[in-house]
Image: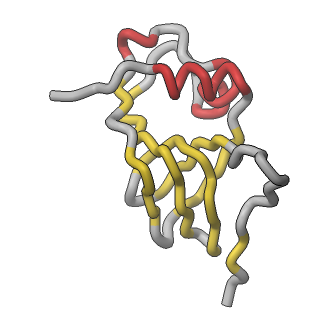
């Protein structure tokens, strides 16, 4: 049984902003509130459907995307749980976080 972990947080500190990749759920970005094995809980989460102007999710996390008008990032969800299939957690740098948070919501 895997131990449930919660990111260490100092008083008044923010949760780490991350991009996660999950086998069945795709790619999401948000504040990492909890992790339990391969399951995570994100706060203020967005699904990343498509990005343009970054070679990889790692580059997106560090620099953001150079072509934001071509990106498709979904609506912000207060709490998102991704259960059992998270295979990657990438911690964002300030520029990547800012770009993702400020990206216009993609809707059909």
Residue in view at x 54 percent, y 44 percent: 30
Residue located farthest toward the bottom when viewing the structure as drawn: 1
Q: Nearer the viewer, residue 32 or 70?
A: 32
Residue in view at x 69 percent, y 34 percent: 92
Which of the colour schemes (rainbow, by chain, secondary structure, one colour) is used? Answer: secondary structure
Task: Indicate left or right for 18 with 9 as reference.
Answer: left
Name the quadrant of the N terminus: bottom right
Residue located farthest toward the front when viewing the structure as drawn: 12
Please state the horizontal and vertical placement of residue 101, each as a whole percent of the image.
51, 27
Q: How many marks?
A: 0
Task: Indicate left or right for 21 with 78 as reference.
Answer: right
Please state the horizontal and vertical placement of residue 85, each as a whole percent of the image.
50, 66
Residue in view at x 62 percent, y 28 percent: 97
Please state the horizontal and vertical placement of residue 94, each as a whole percent of the image.
71, 25
Name the quadrant of the C terminus: top left
Q: Quadrant of residue 65?
A: top right
Q: Nearer the viewer, residue 26 or 9?
A: 9
Residue located farthest toward the right when viewing the structure as drawn: 10
Please state the horizontal and vertical placement of residue 103, each as a whole percent of the image.
44, 20
Q: Quadrant of residue 106?
A: top left
């Amino acid at each position: 049984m895997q131990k449930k972990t919660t990111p260490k947080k100092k008083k008044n500190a923010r949760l780490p902003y991350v991009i996660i990749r999950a086998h069945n759920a795709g790619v999401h970005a948000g504040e990492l509130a909890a992790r339990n094995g391969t399951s995570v809980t994100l706060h203020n989460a967005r699904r990343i459907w498509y990005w343009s102007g970054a070679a990889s999710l790692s580059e997106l996390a560090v620099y953001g995307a150079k072509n934001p008008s071509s990106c498709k990032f979904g609506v912000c969800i207060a709490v998102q749980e991704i259960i059992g299939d998270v295979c990657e957690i990438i911690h964002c740098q300030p520029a990547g976080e800012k770009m993702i948070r400020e990206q216009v919501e993609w809707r059909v």
